[in-house]
Amino acid sequence: MRSYVVDSLIAVAMLGVAVLLGRESVAQGWPELDARAYLLVALAHLPVALRGRWPLGAFVVVQAASVAYVTLGYWPVVSTFGSMLALYTVASVRTPRVAAGCAAVMATVWVYAGLITDGSSMPSVVGQALLYCSVLVWFGILARRSAELTRRLRAEQAERARRAVAEERGRIARELHDVVAHHMSVISVQAGLARFVFDSDPAKARGALGTIAGTSGEALEELRRMLQVLREEDSSVPEGAPMPTLARLGELVERVRAGGLPVELAVEGTRRPLPPGVELCAYRVVQEALTNVLKHARDAHARVELRYRRHDLTVCVTNDGQRVDPDRVPPGAGHGLIGMRERAKLYGGTLSVGPRTGGGFAVRLTLPTSATDGRRGDDRTG
């Protein structure tokens, strides 16, 4: 709809210019335009409003109107604008063979106008016909190739983003599998203990059953989340590697400092045990955020803040470096951001990434710390 409106405005503008030019016909030694001439001028320009939907049809109509206009002895220049735009449009959306055929038709009409006009210099007319038609077809072909290249680039970018999401979800699924396996191991041990002391020590048996109930609830929650992701194996994660937690965040900060980036770590609130998946999500987001600072703002200072609240955990990673120009980031650089968003969404959390008002960049993650809050978060972010 927007393209049709734009093309209509272009057609009306060209018709206006043609009418103004037609008023100079007598001064140029040509007959004055009458009602019939103005009708043909309109037919030679207004159909280009439909060039986006029917490029060949618009070209045929404007050429036919131009032939009729020239045959009646009017000034040929007045009817050329629509023909040239129609030829360019055909070349930009059709094959070069079709464009060449249309260019031959327009060149023939141009030469015909010169033949029936007294005093015309035919070498000049032929040269103009070939030059204008060739240039219009050339620019039309360039426009078509540019549009095709843009479509391919967009498709490749979408495919890269899809693969990044699939790979990140596969890694998340593997890590969650490890978390659930831990829970099931605890349940197995506690179930064996409860059965062993069921008759001799009922209190201990009840404690073991309570542990089983709590652990199984967490395991079921992790399983529910894990079924939401694609289960693709990620060979980049070593077998048996220890699961990162917030307790190891200090080690991560020290490694980043050793890499040359000053990092400050601050904790607000009382540290407490959180579900393993939540801790893993928070750790990975901090890791990715600091990695991005190392890549794009090495001269900056970074700060990592953990805020333990009653129902959620907030992680904020900020730096005071200059804002990164998105056009200068190499292709694929946004995959880490995709991974952070996927992790936050998986645990019902929210993630905001963007420049700070006073300069620098900020990554802010908020995660619910219980299954109930996590389900509420899913309703917010789904």
Image (cartoon, rainbow, N blue to C red):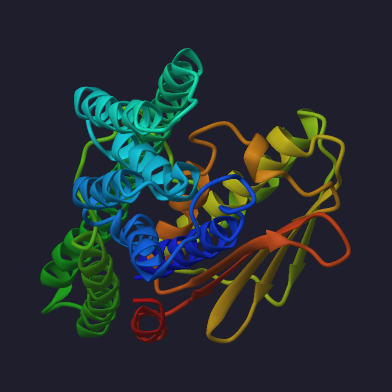
Residue placed most toward the observer, 339 or 307: 339
Position of the C terminus by quadrant: bottom left
Q: Provide residue 226's location: percent of width, then percent of height.
A: 24, 60
Left or right: 354, with 86 as reference point: right
Left or right: 52, with 363 as reference point: left
Is residue 209 at least partly visible in the picture? yes
Left or right: 274, with 259 as reference point: left
Q: Provide residue 263's location: percent of width, then percent of height.
A: 81, 46
The image quadrant of residue 152 is top left
Residue placed most toward the observer, 155 or 378: 155
Question: Looking at the image, which residue is at 32% across and 55% down?
Answer: 179
Q: Total marks drawn? A: 0
The image quadrant of residue 97 is top left
Question: Looking at the image, which residue is at 19% across and 51% down?
Answer: 57
Depicted 372 relative to depicted 330: above or below = below
Q: Provide residue 82's location: percent of width, then percent of height.
A: 40, 50
Question: Looking at the image, which residue is at 86% across and 52% down?
Answer: 320
Depicted 112 relative to depicted 187: above or below = above
Residue furthest toward the top? 123
Position of the N terminus by quadrant: bottom left
Is residue 157 at least partly visible in the picture? no
Question: Looking at the image, which residue is at 58% across and 31% down?
Answer: 330
Left or right: 210, with 260 as reference point: left
Residue placed most toward the observer, 288 or 251: 288
Depicted 128 relative to depicted 117: above or below = above
Q: Provide residue 381's location: percent of width, then percent of height.
A: 40, 77
Residue placed most toward the observer, 169 or 254: 169
